[in-house]
Image (spheres, helix red, strand yellow):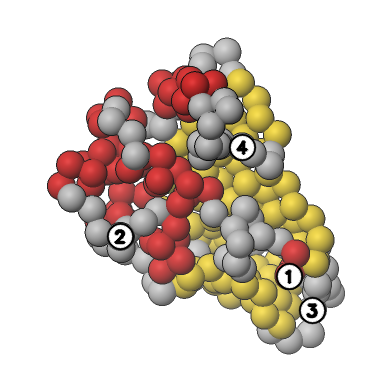
Amino acid sequence: MFLKALGKLAATTLLGAALAGCIDADVDVELLSATTARATITQVMGADFYAMIKMNAEGSRGQSEPEEFCATGALTENSDGTATCIIIEEGRFADLTLGAKQEIVQFTPAGRGLVRVSLRTARMKAEIGADEAMDDETRKMVEAFFAGRGATVRFSGLEITDTNMDLSSDGRSAQQKIQFLDLLRGTADLPEEVYAVVRVAR
């Protein structure tokens, strides 16, 4: 997933605290039917780190390929030097990868016209390398990389009938904000999974 790739970038660079404030991510999963959904991942990378990524990519041409930001999405280079990557996937539940090799979001039938959508928070910890062994210097660099940044996970459809996430005022979506640094340090106050039961048909 995109978080693990960014974690590797942080762990292998020597920029230390200069990596602070490099990325935020939004993951939107909209259920379209009892078998299909649209997933939109939006990532925004800070100007300093994006400049380093571009320089690294240019210096590595003809050699082994470096980790690449927005390899499969639509990249926009903003006027302030930041970069925005948008990845959109639409189709059957099993075909939605969210940039991962294995299923991240799980879809389970929950009754007539209902689908339960869930994301295990342990998977997110694994994606940012929270359980990987690091020396003190590397951990400080990785923590600087994720400081002040996070992700918002959102599930939506015709109606949310049950959830442990924050329900929107119109009752059609539920979201959970997650700080990467809290995940990395093991201090995030999160359930084992975040979920929403979504009505997809009346």
> Residue placed farthest to the front in the image?
62
**Residue 80 shown left or right of residue 136 in the figure:** right
**Residue 186 shown left or right of residue 50 in the figure:** left
Instruction: Residue 38 in the image: state x and y as whole percent.
Output: 75, 56
Q: Which comes sooner in the sequence, label 3 or label 4? A: 4
CA separation, marks 3 and 4?
35 Å
In the picture of the structure, the residue carrying the numbered disc 4 is 70
In the picture of the structure, the residue carrying the numbered disc 1 is 94
- The amino acid type of the residue labelled 3 equals Gly
In the picture of the structure, the residue carrying the numbered disc 2 is 132
> Label 4 near label 2: C-beta < 8 Å?
no
In the picture of the structure, the residue carrying the numbered disc 3 is 113
CA separation, marks 2 and 4?
24 Å
> Label 3 near label 2: C-beta < 8 Å?
no
Instruction: Residue 189 in the image: state x and y as whole percent.
Output: 31, 63
Q: How many marks?
A: 4
**Residue 31 shown left or right of residue 79 in the figure:** right
Q: Which comes sooner in the sequence, label 2 or label 4? A: 4
